[in-house]
Amino acid sequence: MGILEDAIYNAKTAAGFVGKKAGKIVDVSKLTITAAELNSEISKKCEILGRVFYESKTTEKSYDTAISELIEKISELRGQLDSVNELIAESKNKTKCPKCSMVNSKEAIFCAKCGERLRNTEDIYEPDEIKDENSEESADVNAQIDTEADNSEAPASPEE
Ligand SMILES: [Zn+2]
């Protein structure tokens, strides 16, 4: 049983990292590595769990404690993975000013602190889709909208 216990208790996790979050923008690539580490840790634990479960079914010994501890550990790791994934999503929505390191929202054109341009205006104005006014479908949709509400000036967007 010594080997199994070692596997359960000595496996390193990325737990310490998750504790440091607190709204700070973190390097997404580091977070991605952490997520990968957590994933592989979860996989390892699941594999051990499978082995312990097999042992428990094929021998007289009871491994209930080990099994419940493994399940607990896996749940904990999954929780950490969720947090890391949340942080990744959060960090992807923020952009750091290359000049002063101020954290701005991804939509910001200029840095709120130093006024540095964060992105080109061409990125902002996406060309509208070209609408086919002549299609019969759009006429149908317009007729429907007219009878339903007063938003008839909304452009018809027929499903194709
Ligand atoms: Zn700045």
Image (cartoon, helix red, strand yellow):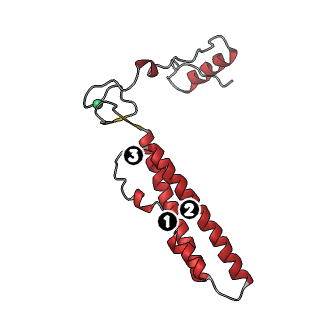
Q: Could you say whether the residue bearing mark 1 is in a helix, strand or loop?
A: loop
Query: In the image, is 40 to the left or to the right of 31?
Result: right
Residue that numbered label 3 is attached to: 26
Query: In the image, is 94 to the left or to the right of 67?
Result: left
Q: Position of residue 24 (x, y in %)?
A: 34, 47
Q: Amino acid at mark 2?
A: Glu
Q: Amino acid at mark 1?
A: Lys
Quadrant that contains the N terminus: bottom right
Residue at 45% x, 22% y is: 123
Residue at 59% x, 78% y is: 3
- Find the distance from the CA under tag 3 to the CA under tag 1: 21 Å
- Find the distance from the CA under tag 1 to the CA under tag 2: 8 Å
Q: Decide: is 90 above or below 127.
A: below
- Find the distance from the CA under tag 3 to the CA under tag 2: 22 Å
Q: Furthest residue to the left?
A: 113
Q: Quadrant of ligand 1?
A: top left
Query: In the image, is 65 to the left or to the right of 124?
Result: right
Asked if labels 2 and 1 touch by Cβ distance under 8 angstroms, the answer is yes
Q: Residues within 10 Å of mark 1 (few under 14, many from 20)?
A: few
Between 156 and 79, the one nearer to me in the picture: 79
Q: Earlier in the sequence, mark 3 or mark 1?
A: 1
- The image's mark for residue 12 is 1
Q: Residues within 10 Å of mark 2 (few under 14, many from 20)?
A: some
